[in-house]
Image (cartoon, rainbow, N blue to C red):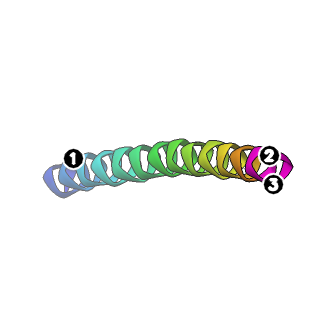
Amino acid sequence: MVEIWRNFSICNSIIAGAVQFLYGNWTILLTILLVLAILDFISGMAAGFV
């Protein structure tokens, strides 16, 4: 019983780590996309003014 619980907790920590890793990457990706969108908008505005 203890052995199963130990394996379960290891599995849980791996899943938690994977979720946290994915969540962290999603926020980084969203931030990059947001910055690119803003830069694209600014360059579009600049091209419009020229």
Query: In terms of image quadrants, where is residue 35?
Result: top right
In front of the other: 25 or 14? 25
In the rendered structure, which segment of residues is drawn in magenta? 45-50
Residue 24 vertical position relative to residue 7 in the rendered view, above or below: above
Relative placement, left or right, of 6 versus 19 is left
Task: Report, in whole angstroms, how far the alpha carbon at label 2 lies from the one at label 3.
Answer: 6 Å
Farthest residue, direction right: 49
Evaluate if marks 2 and 3 touch, with contact meaning CB atoms under 8 Å apart: yes
Residue 18, position as x, y percentages in the image: 34, 50
The residue that disc 1 covers is 6
Q: How crowded is mark 2: few (under 14 residues within 10 Å), some or many (20 or more)?
A: few
What amino acid type is highlighted by mark number 2? Val
Farthest residue, direction front: 50
Task: Report, in whole angstroms, how far the alpha carbon at label 1 lies from the one at label 3.
Answer: 62 Å
Q: In which quarter of the image is the N terminus?
A: bottom left
Residue at 40% across, 44% down = 21
What amino acid type is highlighted by mark number 3? Gly
The residue that disc 2 covers is 50
In front of the other: 9 or 24? 24
Task: Report, in whole angstroms, how far the alpha carbon at label 2 lies from the one at label 1.
Answer: 66 Å
What is the secondary structure assignment of the residue under circle 2?
loop
Point out the tag, 1 or 3, that comes first from the N-terminus: 1
